[in-house]
Amino acid sequence: MKPFKFKQFSVEQDQCAMKVGTDGVLLGAWAAIENNPESILDIGAGTGLIALMIAQRSLADSIDALEIDEGAYEQCVSNFEASDWGDRLFCYHAGLDEFVDEWEDPYDLIVSNPPFYSEDVSSGDSSRDNARQNQSLPFDELLEGVSKLLAQDGSFATIIPFKEETAFLQLAKSFGLYAQRITRVKGSTTSEVKRSLLQFGFAESDVDLSELIIETGRHEYTAEYVALTKDFYLKM
């Protein structure tokens, strides 16, 4: 399998169950970094795509990644080392629960493109299924971990299926995390909302709510989607 080439880095993905996809690119480009986070954590890093995108976008001193699957962990490390930002990127081979127990320094920004097929699905490929099913990282475990690892004025960005949004927002509130930005994503003008991009903090505030449409026709991208991803995709 060929690496996925972006403008400033490449992502090898032959050892990863979850390949480079639109969700990860959306989150990596959308997560707000205006408050100049110094320390960033990507939970369930997979290929390392989102951490690499944020390394390209930000000046953060340290960008850590967490990956429990051995093959994905090894691939993430090699993708980090092959990039221009290898000295700022580090991947831990651990689960979120054990990482939370041992980690002491809070993060200014946490990002996660979590596995989210809560229904029991099987593609016949167990590592892909584990990556996609949230049995391996249930939403409550993710949010609890985030609430313990996030700095008081930090923020947490994630992408989930739109149908899970209401329940996820309620669950987040139970851990003291409040939505600050929500962008609902549609594939085209006529399709239903498919994904929710969410950014949380510990302070309650008015929610910045928006919609993003990806295409107007096949491979004809909206100006908003091009503006969001043009620093990354080769053909944008």
Image: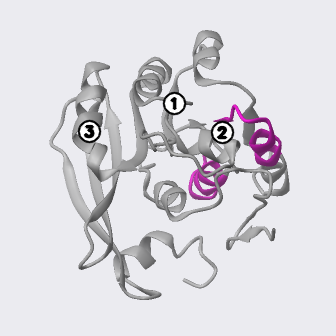
Quickly name the residue at label 2: 61
Q: Residues within 10 Å of mark 3 (few under 14, many from 20)?
A: many
Left or right: 113, with 2 as reference point: left
Extreme residue toward the top, this view: 101
Quickly name the residue at label 1: 135
Question: Which amino acid type corresponds to the residue marked 3 in the rendered image?
Answer: Ala
Secondary structure found at label 1: loop
- Residue 157 spot, x, y in % from top left: 42, 43
- Residue 212 spot, x, y in % from top left: 30, 68
Q: Quadrant of residue 9?
A: bottom right
Extreme residue toward the left, this view: 206
- Residue 70 spot, x, y in % from top left: 79, 35
Which numbered dot is residue 232? none
Name the residue nearer the viewer: 172 or 202.
172
* Residue located at (49% from left, 44% from top): 36
Q: How far apart are labels 3 and 2 at the CA level?
A: 26 Å
Do residues under tags 1 and 3 come within 8 Å of each other at their CB atoms?
Answer: no
Quickly name the residue at label 3: 179
Q: Which residues are magenta?
A: 49-77
Question: Which amino acid type corresponds to the residue marked 2 in the rendered image?
Answer: Asp
* Residue located at (51% from left, 64% from top): 22
Whether residue 101 is situated above or below residue 129 in the rendered picture: above
Q: Is residue 67 magenta?
A: yes
Q: Nearer the viewer, mark 3 or mark 2?
A: 3
Question: Which amino acid type corresponds to the residue marked 1 in the rendered image?
Answer: Gln
Sequence order check, earlier mark of 1 and 3: 1
Sequence order check, earlier mark of 1 and 2: 2
Name the residue nearer the viewer: 34 or 223.
223
Q: From the image, which quarter does the N terminus lie in?
A: bottom right
